[in-house]
């Protein structure tokens, strides 16, 4: 019974430009580690081949060092690796694949399918039908030839493609690089291994997206996995088992502060963040100056623990309490400024509202700093 490890969308060379330089470098480096984990899993589960359904590289222009490093990462699995180019690393006349060949970087146990020709794995009695992309975007279904492809009697028929299954994924996805939703049935495939969608997804019992092995975006789509695929015999439904491969957990925290317990709950969540968390935090609502101070202190602590924590406080209004104002001892003109800044946070222009909030927080800090040591409200 042949066993495969199905993976895709490694996106080696991804830059993560939305993060600071240190965070981006660590996230990019983890993609190599994910490939090494895949190799170890392939060995541990004694698979017969690893099927990689496109977008091995994120761009054609990765450095030669990156090319060598990627193929070196395959070394933990001595069995077969079978890859196709995707839209990010399409098999152009001059591509990352032709450069890798000139560099003699690819190991002997790797087959890169650069043309739509059946790959016969005779010892396994498996015929792999590849649909490599030869340009970034196509508008014809490159898997159409699968249906007419002749393969030896008794061989499993396994499709390998990269694109968008029509009528199943979101409408804004169903455009370039289309794949017919019934391709597995129309081409008599025992399994169709897909790439392009970055989350694990079952289209039908014989058609699956593996998703990227290391999450790379804030979307709840079951990413960070690979698929273990067992096929007992031609015509028998495959047994598909998702396996966790990712290290980092990408998630979004959206909090609305209205009462003190809302802030307490948010701070407890921030305290739980650790070195494997990549977090996008957005806070809205209102809090007093003391609450804002607690929040910013907790954010600073969490940013030191998490792999990455980006913060959006644009919709958070700071409303000083009576105790805040008394502690600030703001009188005369300063009190008028504090009042104006409180009101300005209701501006329709988000940038002006945020500037007012920031100015209020800064002014509060300056007023607090000028108080004599040991002097507070009522002293």
Image (cartoon, rainbow, N blue to C red):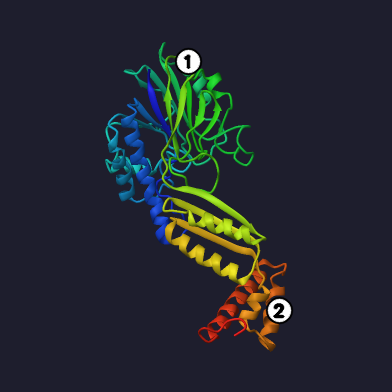
Side (left or right) of 181 relative to 22: right
Side (left or right) of 219 relative to 112: right
Could one spot residue 209 in this view of the protein? yes
Residue position for label 1: 236
Tell me the number on the disc at residue 6. none
Quarter where residue 101 is shown:
top left
- Image height check: is 75 above or below 160? below
- Give the label, 2 or 1, closer to the camera: 2
Residue 353, horizontal then vertical, whole percent:
67, 70
Quarter where residue 246 is shown:
top left
Give the residue displayed 46% in from the left and 57% down from the top: 308
- Image height check: is 337 above or below 352? below
Residue 374, horizontal then vertical, whole percent:
52, 83
Query: Camera-side residue: 260 or 155?
Result: 260
Q: Quadrant of the N terminus?
A: top left
Residue lying furthest top: 153
Task: Classify 10 Å Cα crowding around label 2: few (below 14), some (14-19), many (20 and above).
Answer: few
Side (left or right) of 49 relative to 200: left
Quarter where residue 262 is shown:
bottom right
Task: Classify 10 Å Cα crowding around label 1: few (below 14), some (14-19), many (20 and above).
Answer: few
Residue position for label 2: 340
Query: Camera-side residue: 119 or 26?
Result: 26
Callout 2: SS: helix
Callout 1: SS: loop
Query: Camera-side residue: 150 or 226?
Result: 226
Query: Camera-side residue: 37 or 233?
Result: 37
Could one spot residue 18 in this view of the protein? no
Residue lying furthest front: 379
Residue 355, horizontal then vertical, whole percent:
63, 73
Residue 34, horizontal then vertical, whole percent:
38, 42
Sooner in the amino-acid sequence: mark 2 or mark 1: 1
């Amino acid at each position: 019974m042949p066993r495969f490890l199905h993976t895709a969308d490694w996106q080696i060379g991804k830059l993560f430009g939305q993060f600071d330089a240190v965070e981006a470098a660590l996230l990019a480096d983890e993609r190599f580690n994910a490939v090494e984990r895949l190799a170890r899993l392939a060995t541990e589960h004694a698979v017969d081949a690893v099927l990689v359904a496109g977008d091995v590289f994120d761009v054609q222009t990765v450095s030669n060092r990156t090319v060598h490093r990627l193929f070196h990462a395959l070394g933990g699995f001595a069995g077969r690796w079978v890859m196709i180019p995707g839209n990010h690393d399409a098999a152009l006349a001059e591509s990352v694949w032709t450069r890798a060949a000139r560099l003699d970087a690819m190991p002997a146990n790797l087959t890169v399918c650069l043309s739509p020709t059946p790959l016969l794995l005779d010892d396994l009695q498996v015929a792999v039908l590849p649909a490599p992309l030869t340009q970034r975007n196509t508008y014809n279904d490159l898997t159409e030839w699968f249906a007419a492809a002749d393969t030896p009697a008794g061989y499993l028929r396994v499709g390998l493609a990269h694109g968008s299954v029509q009528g199943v994924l979101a409408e804004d996805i169903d455009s370039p690089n289309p794949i017919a939703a019934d391709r597995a049935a129309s081409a008599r495939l025992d399994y169709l291994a897909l790439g392009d969608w970055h989350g694990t997804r079952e289209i039908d019992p014989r058609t699956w997206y593996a998703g990227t092995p290391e999450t790379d975006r804030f979307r709840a789509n079951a990413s960070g996995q690979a698929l273990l695929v067992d096929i007992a015999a031609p015509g028998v439904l495959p047994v598909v088992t998702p396996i966790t491969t990712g290290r980092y957990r990408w998630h979004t925290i959206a909090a609305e502060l209205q009462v003190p317990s809302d802030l307490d709950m948010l701070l407890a969540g921030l305290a739980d963040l650790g070195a494997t968390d990549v977090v996008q935090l957005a806070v809205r609502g209102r809090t007093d100056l003391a609450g804002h101070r607690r929040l910013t202190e907790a954010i600073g602590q969490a940013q030191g623990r998490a792999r990455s924590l980006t913060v959006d406080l644009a919709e958070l209004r700071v409303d000083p309490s009576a105790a805040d104002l008394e502690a600030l001892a703001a009188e005369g003109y300063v009190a008028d400024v504090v009042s104006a800044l409180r009101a300005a946070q209701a501006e329709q222009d988000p940038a002006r509202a945020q500037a007012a909030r920031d100015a209020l927080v800064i002014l509060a800090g300056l007023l607090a700093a000028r108080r004599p040591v040991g002097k507070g409200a009522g002293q």
